[in-house]
Image (cartoon, helix red, strand yellow):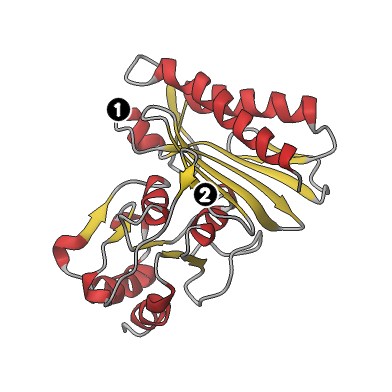
Amino acid sequence: MTPKDIELAQKLAEAAGEAIRPFFRAKFDQEAKSDSTFVTEADRAAEAAMRAIIEAERPDDGIIGEEYGTRNEGASRQWVLDPIDGTTSFIAGRPIFGTLIALMQEGFPLIGIIDQPISRERWVGVVGRETLFNGQPARSARCRELKDAVLATTSPHLFDEHDADHFMGLAGKVAPRKIIYGGDCYNYGLVASGHVDVVCEAGLLLHDFAALAPIIDGAGGMMCDWNGEPLHAESDGHVLAIGDHARVDDVLEAIACHH
């Protein structure tokens, strides 16, 4: 990884934003995919713009994209792209979606970007460096007790029965009025900036979480699966983001023991 890789990641975010903004709260085509999620013209335009740049400037690198699949699958370096994480929020005109961009080396993320192109908010995480929010250092919040935490998840309806049971174990340790729903990747940016304490999700795919770990880690928090293991290309999609390392054991205990 070089400074030019970070510059390229930022260039990809700019290109995606330019492709997305004309469609926001405008008329656009959309359709349901086989997994019951939705895709719009904006998703496809943003990913196509990013892929064109990578193919021109890093032809030997791989690409894993939500909409257009995998290129150079065997490459040790892979750009992982989610052009609009939170397509339902985008469709609804809610500016809490984001573009996710990650550079992975041998299955582990080195660079991660969350870009919100409407409010023009961008979190950039690089392994071994401070996370930046619009160019300034971002720091996650300290949380004295789990009962004081703000807990976020995209939707309780996305958990299966087993996972919902475990989530409720965690939710039961938090004040009910400090649980927020919706937000997708935007919630993780809010953890990095110290506004949300814990995010809990299940069923995520690589393009949903690859960009997030460098951002949370570089802001002083921790990203892991529901067993406390670091996230990588083979992780099963059970994801936690915890702003304060002191609360990690509390979160893992709460999510594991509810039966």
Residue 47 x/y as whole percent: 59, 29
Residue kind at label 2, given as amino acid type: Asp
Q: Which mark is residue 195?
A: none
Q: Nearer the viewer, residue 57 or 31?
A: 57
Q: Residue at x 36, y 81 (%)?
A: 250
Q: Residue at x 34, y 51 (%)?
A: 154
Q: Which of marks 1 and 2 precedes in the sequence?
A: 1
| As drawn, 236 above or below 3 | below
Q: Which mark is residue 208?
A: 2
Residue assigned mark 1: 93
Residue 75 x/y as whole percent: 82, 47
| As drawn, 66 above or below 176 | above
Residue 98 x/y as whole percent: 44, 37
Q: Nearer the viewer, residue 113 or 63?
A: 113
Q: Which quadrant holds residue 249?
A: bottom left
Quick check: 12 left or right of 254?
right
Quarter holding the C terminus is bottom left
Q: Is residue 143 visible?
A: yes
- Secondary structure under tag 1 reads loop
Q: Residues within 10 Å of mark 1 (few under 14, many from 20)?
A: some
**Residue furthest to the front:** 136
Q: Nearer the viewer, residue 66 or 105?
A: 105
Task: Give the CA separation, mark 2 to mark 1.
Answer: 20 Å
Residue 148 x/y as whole percent: 22, 71
Q: Nearer the viewer, residue 125 or 43?
A: 125
Quick check: 62 left or right of 87?
right
Residue kind at label 1, given as amino acid type: Gly
Q: Decide: marks 2, 1 in contact (CB < 8 A)?
A: no
